Amino acid sequence: MTTNAPAACSANEEQERFWNGVAGPLWVAAEEETERHTGPFGAAALVVAEPTAGEAALDVGCGCGATTIALATAVGAGGSVLGVDLSAAMLARAGERAAANGMSQVRFRRADAQVADLGCGSFNLVFSRFGVMFFADPSAAFANLRRSLHPRGRMVFACWQAPSANPWMAVVNRGAARIFSLEPPSHDAPGPFALCDPDRLGAVLRAGGFSAVEITEHVEQLHLGAGQPVEGWLHQRLLMGPARAAYLDAGSGRQREVRAVLADELAAYGVDGEDPESGFVMDAAAWIVEARP
């Protein structure tokens, strides 16, 4: 069942607009491609989380529901999983996925996890695959998630390391910033790299009430953009990145020029220079975090 009403009491209106007006529909349309860069890290986080039969789990920023289904499979019919996200489009896709798998132990709710009433001590496991970097006030958000956690429960999530460790994002984002003469966004602002500094990450979690925090590095080489033209992959990345407004304002001719410049810069990562749809192999790095009250 999906509760798809507006996310009441959202503390981050900018992210609410972004994930419903821009990112959510894009992620649904490109679900297979986005799983290529998020899936391996989600799998690594699930190994650390060790969800077991009968547990109650919360999936924060559940997106299109891939991790929610994985959690539901692990906890079984005797357990339960609540997936929360801001994006109505992604939650609709997640609900379809759960229904197709016949998982009655799964519920979805459109909510801002920073402020939503998620219950007190309701969950054995709070889990997230790249869903916790977008809070307006991360310390308040993690305090709210801690309240929802059983005193002997645990929180496990994946979040991105610094842009320098993630060229699969940084090459396009930095190239676009240079072309459009944009200042790079602050890492402290809500966004993919908001928790990339492990010292700040640990401090934020302790401020949220977690006393035992373990942060582990996880590195992958990702094969991205396979089976689609380079320009199509770049268009998607530019729409998702911090230069999206400048890119959209540029007009179709200028957009083609920008994509051509960035395609040249990506050529060094190409799998097969003779095949424009062979994709790229690029490094990616995340933190896998386990925290307990």
Image: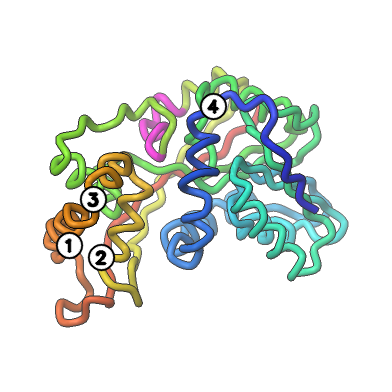
Mark 1–mark 4 Cα distance, whole angstroms, equals 34 Å
Q: Does the magenta stretch include residue 193?
A: yes
Between residues 271 and 50, which one lies in front from this camera angle?
271
For marks 3 and 4, give the CA distance.
30 Å
Quarter of the figure with the C terminus: top right
- Indicate which label's residue lies in the foreground, 3 or 1: 3
Dots 2, 1 in contact, CB < 8 A: yes
Q: Give the range drawn in magenta.
A: 192-201
Q: Disc 1, disc 4: CB below 8 Å?
A: no
Q: Main secondary structure of the magenta part?
A: loop
Instruction: Give the residue at mark 1.
Output: 263
How are the residues colored?
rainbow
Sequence-wise, the earlier of marks 3 and 4 is 4
Residue type at the position of mark 3 = Gly
**Contact (Cβ within 8 Å) of mark 3 with mark 4:** no
Q: Which amino acid does label 1 sit on?
A: Ala
> Callout 4, which amino acid?
Asn
Q: Residues within 10 Å of mark 3 (few under 14, many from 20)?
A: few
**Secondary structure of residue under mark 3:** loop
The residue where tag 2 is placed is 231
Mark linked to residue 12: 4
Mark nearer the N terminus (4 vs 2) = 4
Would you say 41 lies left or right of 123 here?
A: left
Camera-near label (3 vs 4) is: 3
